[in-house]
Amino acid sequence: MKQIDKYPHKAKALKPDVRQTQSAGGNFTDRLKAYRDQHAQALFSSLGRLFSTPFTSTMTIGVLAIAISLASGFYLVVVNLQQLTSGLEASNQISLFLRDEISEAHANKYADNIRKNPDVQHVKVITKKQAMDEFKGFSGFGEAINVLEKNPLPIVIEVLPKDVLVDKQALTKLFEDFKQSAEVDFAQMDMAWVERLQSIVSTARLAAMLLAVVLGLAVFFIAGNTIRLEIHNRRQEIIIAKLVGATNSFIQRPFLYTGFWIGFLSGIGAWFIVTFMMLILRQSVENLSGLYSGAFHLLFFSYLETLILLATSTLLAVVGSWLVLHIQVNQLQPE
């Protein structure tokens, strides 16, 4: 017992298990309260241990926050890239040049049928007169065109598909369906431009996923190594706890909550880092967008994305801690 007297605060930490044992014969509510009190004590005591070594804890959480911010920041870059490319979707519109004998009434009826297609976002009809007026304005021929006895330009229907950057096969099928329509004489769309946009977005999305996996593994191993060092520093405490009958789950609990706090605080730090960087860039990006007559606004983390960020960082740290604890605590046995 002298060995225990040297660590009175360690012996005190075992009291929740004694309470649980005493209440084992009681009702379910008593056991549930004892279980709740154990976890509350482990939760706040682990946070207190982090604050007791501020420099070491800050360094660990800072490194993890930077790693998480790199992955989440690149994710935001991809999200904003998708927003930017969505503004270029008008370049992927399908132009349908109708047959010369198609009247304007027939063309408007055909356009109404196209609008009913769930894959179509917007439809615009350009009449022969409108096409001629545009041609006069841009061609420079002016009055020379007035000598023509008949307007040779066809009626054109411009179709803007939905989600053109997502499903190339559906877009190709839609284009082929329009080409085979009886009203259409010629259909045109720059498929090469669509493929380039899809390739850019897909590559950026894949790069973001790979970076997230690599940096997620970094969080996993750094958190696990931090807990391993903590176990090494508290080796005598763990052995004494086992000598007086503490279970592995009781010993592991405060270490798991330490991993929880490390992951959670790192996620919060990463959120602030990314948000701060986006705030710095926002004004410059929007000024650049204004020079090109655009209305581009940087997107930040949504509430759901923030919750996912915190949950992922916390889960990685807890799992890494649990794996180390499962191996290390079982290896520590009283002599």
Image: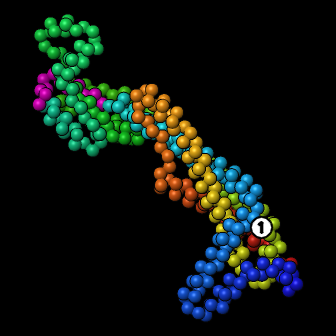
Residue 312 in the image, given as x and y percentages of width and height: 57, 57
The residue at the point 72 percent across, 75 percent down is 251
Frontmost residue, 327 versus 172: 327
Image check: 263 left or right of 206?
right
The residue at the point 64 percent across, 51 percent down is 65
Q: How is the image coloured?
A: rainbow
On screen, residue 24 above or below 183:
below
Q: Which residue is mark 1?
A: 231
**Can residue 200 be seen in this snapshot?**
no
Q: Could you tell me the amino acid type at mark 1?
A: Ile
Frontmost residue, 61 versus 79: 61
Judged from this view, the residue extending furthest toward the right is 2
On screen, residue 48 above or below 132:
below
Q: How many marks?
A: 1
Residues drawn in magenta:
94-105
The residue at the point 48 percent across, 40 percent down is 298
The residue at the point 56 percent across, 57 percent down is 310
Q: Which quadrant of the structure image shows residue 176?
A: top left
Image check: 199 left or right of 240?
left
**Can residue 235 be seen in this snapshot?**
yes
Frontmost residue, 287 versus 198: 287
Residue 184 in the image, given as x and y percentages of width and height: 21, 28
Q: Is residue 100 magenta?
A: yes
